[in-house]
Amino acid sequence: MEGKVYKSTGSWYTVKGADGSFYECRIKGKFRIKGIKSTNPIAVGDHVHFELDDKGDEKVGVIHSIEDRKNYIIRKSVNLSKQTHIIAANLDQVFLLITLNNPITYTIFIDRFLVTAEAYDVPVVLVFNKIDTYSQEETDEIKFLASLYREIGYTCIGISAKTGKNVDKIKEMMKGKTSMFSGHSGVGKSTLINAIEPNLEIKTAEISQQHLQGQHTTTFAEMFDLSFGAQIIDTPGIKGFGIVDMEKEEIGDYFPELFELKQDCKFNNCIHVDEPHCAVKRALEAGKVSWSRYKSYLQMINGEDDTYRMDMYGERK
Ligand SMILES: Nc1nc2c(ncn2[C@@H]2O[C@H](COP(=O)(O)OP(=O)(O)OP(=O)(O)O)[C@@H](O)[C@H]2O)c(=O)[nH]1
Ligand SMILES: [Mg+2]
Ligand SMILES: [Zn+2]
């Protein structure tokens, strides 16, 4: 039988079969996918082949193979284990939810996420949520960030999952596609899904007043079929986002604005640090490349992990 993974809780996978019903599946023996070392061999969004359990249980199955992925989002955990984890596979697009405060999203986090998405060919839309809560100054900062990322080519949109402002625009972009909501815990991923499809009633929780962080309310990635012909994957909040298996020389290629300038650098293997006649450094001095993006780039090529808790001006908080 053939199906798509809708939820994975570790050892069990909920698979929707071609017949439209759900099966609880396990993996047969050791399941390894060539070239990818991750803690989860199968992720939400994967197309799998499975057999019904031979004990005669109609709704329980065993996955024996997986189809090639169109793309996926993979991250390295920022704790000591450095294990990699595939968040979801076969995505048409990802909406990265961003809040200025409650919780804070730093640009280094956004940039790491964007680099991974570029590397694995997943289009990203930046969604600035909770615009109902911002002061004038904060609204100006959102506008600044949105114009920075728009200039590079990313679609940016300010919304409020609470008041419903611009939620219809997100819905429009989702039609006919499989999308994923990602971002820190507490940015409002599940709240936004509920705003889009109220009868799902996904669990949400207030962020902690003490730490101004989310409470990791969603604990497993899960896909939902929506009434207007779309699929959405809700995901648990991510803290840091480590990039996986990228050569230093390759990272700049996933910053679209740096990649574009590279051909004008004197050396074709320029990594835009100390080389003479570097087009990126020239553009930086001329204010045509953003310092916050360049700073993120430097941190990534220097292999600095877990430094995402910096503000956009590089000050550690
Ligand atoms: N004021 C305001 N609050 C919001 C908005 N969106 C979400 N919230 C609140 O933010 C809190 C966290 O929302 P969740 O939807 O649980 O966040 P999440 O991103 O799913 O978090 P995790 O599941 O922990 O990753 C809840 O109290 C929501 O009501 C918004 O647009 N405006
Ligand atoms: Mg959630
Ligand atoms: Zn250069």
Image (cartoon, rainbow, N blue to C red):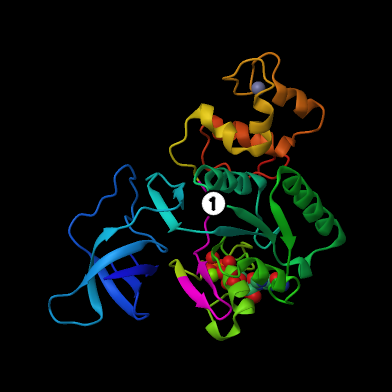
**Vertical side of 114 occupied by 208: above or below:** below
Q: Quadrant of residue 291?
A: top right
Q: Name the element at disc 1.
A: loop
Q: Residues within 10 Å of mark 1 (few under 14, many from 20)?
A: many
In the rendered structure, the answer to whether residue 62 lies left or right of residue 300 reads left
Q: Residue at x 34, y 79 (%)?
A: 19
Question: Can you give x and y, in whole percent of width and height, for residue 68 in the image?
Answer: 36, 53
Magenta stretch: includes residue 224:
yes
Q: Residue at x 79, y 49 (%)?
A: 147
- In depth, the one of 18 and 36 nearer the eye is 18
Start-end of magenta stretch: 223-241
Q: Residue at x 47, y 35 (%)?
A: 246
**Vertical side of 67 occupied by 254: above or below:** above
The answer to whether residue 215 shows anywhere in this view is no
Question: Can you give x and y, in whole percent of width and height, for residue 314 in the image?
Answer: 69, 38
In the rendered structure, the answer to whether residue 116 lies left or right of residue 133 reads left
Question: Can you give x and y, in whole percent of width and height, for residue 48 in the image?
Answer: 31, 63
Question: Can you give x and y, in whole percent of width and height, for residue 5 in the image?
Answer: 37, 67
- In depth, the one of 115 and 184 nearer the eye is 115
Farthest residue in the left direction?
55
Q: Quadrant of residue 7?
A: bottom left
Quadrant hosting ligand 3: top right
Q: The residue under label 1 is which amino acid type? A: Val
In the rendered structure, the answer to whether residue 38 lies left or right of residue 160 reads left
Magenta stretch: includes residue 289:
no
Of the 4 image quadrants, the one containing the N terminus is bottom left
Q: Residue at x 70, y 54 (%)?
A: 155
The answer to whether residue 36 shows anywhere in this view is yes
**Vertical side of 161 occupied by 135: above or below:** above
The residue that mark 1 highlights is: 122
